[in-house]
């Protein structure tokens, strides 16, 4: 009976060692869980970005306001009979 108990104890210790300390044990599970959590956070960030881009595309396809806003801001375009004023502050002139 003692021999059987000793063999079972050694087997249990070997399994516990493998479970807690080996590269395929619990440390690997924790590392994989952390990697999954990081990937999920990155996926959520990309989902939000995609939603924003989809909304912008829909706005550009559906309305002329967004197109006009972009033309004014990025290209400096103006409407017909509209005057564009560019105010530049001169830091050399004392007030």
Image (cartoon, rainbow, N blue to C red):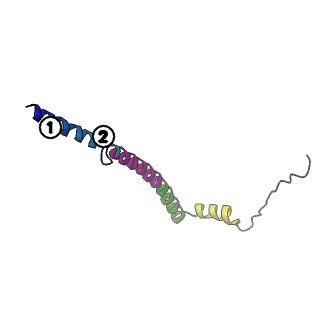
Mark 2 lies on residue: 20
Query: Is 33 in front, or is 40?
Result: 33
Q: Which residues are magenta?
A: 28-48
Q: Residue at x 43, y 53 (%)?
A: 43
Q: Majority secondary structure of the magenta segment?
A: helix
Of the numbered discs 1 and 2, the one sitting upstream in the chain is: 1
Query: Is 83 in front, or is 49?
Result: 49
Q: Residue at x 53, y 59 (%)?
A: 56
Asked if residue 44 is among those painted magenta in the image, a careful observer would answer yes
As drawn, 13 above or below 73? above
Which residue sits furthest right? 94
The kind of secondary structure element at disc 1 is helix
- Image quadrant assignment for residue 85: bottom right
Image coordinates of residue 8 in percent, x first then y, are 15, 36
Image coordinates of residue 31 in percent, x first then y, are 38, 46
Circle 2 packing at 10 Å, graded few (<14), some (14-19), many (20+), is few
Mark 1 lies on residue: 7
As drawn, 37 above or below 13? below
Circle 1 packing at 10 Å, graded few (<14), some (14-19), many (20+), is few
Query: Is 38 in front, or is 25?
Result: 25
Image coordinates of residue 18 in percent, x first then y, are 27, 43
- Image quadrant assignment for residue 76: bottom right
As drawn, 18 above or below 52? above
Q: Quadrant of the N terminus?
A: top left
The kind of secondary structure element at disc 2 is helix
């Amino acid at each position: 009976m003692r021999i059987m108990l000793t063999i079972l104890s050694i087997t249990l210790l070997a399994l516990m060692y493998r479970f807690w300390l080996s590269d395929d044990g619990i440390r690997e599970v924790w590392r994989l869980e952390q990697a999954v959590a990081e990937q999920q956070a990155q996926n959520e960030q990309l989902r939000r970005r995609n939603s924003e881009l989809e909304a912008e595309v829909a706005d550009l396809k559906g309305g002329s306001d967004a197109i006009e806003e972009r033309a004014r801001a990025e290209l400096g375009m103006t409407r017909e009979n509209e005057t564009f004023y560019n105010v530049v502050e001169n830091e050399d002139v004392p007030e």
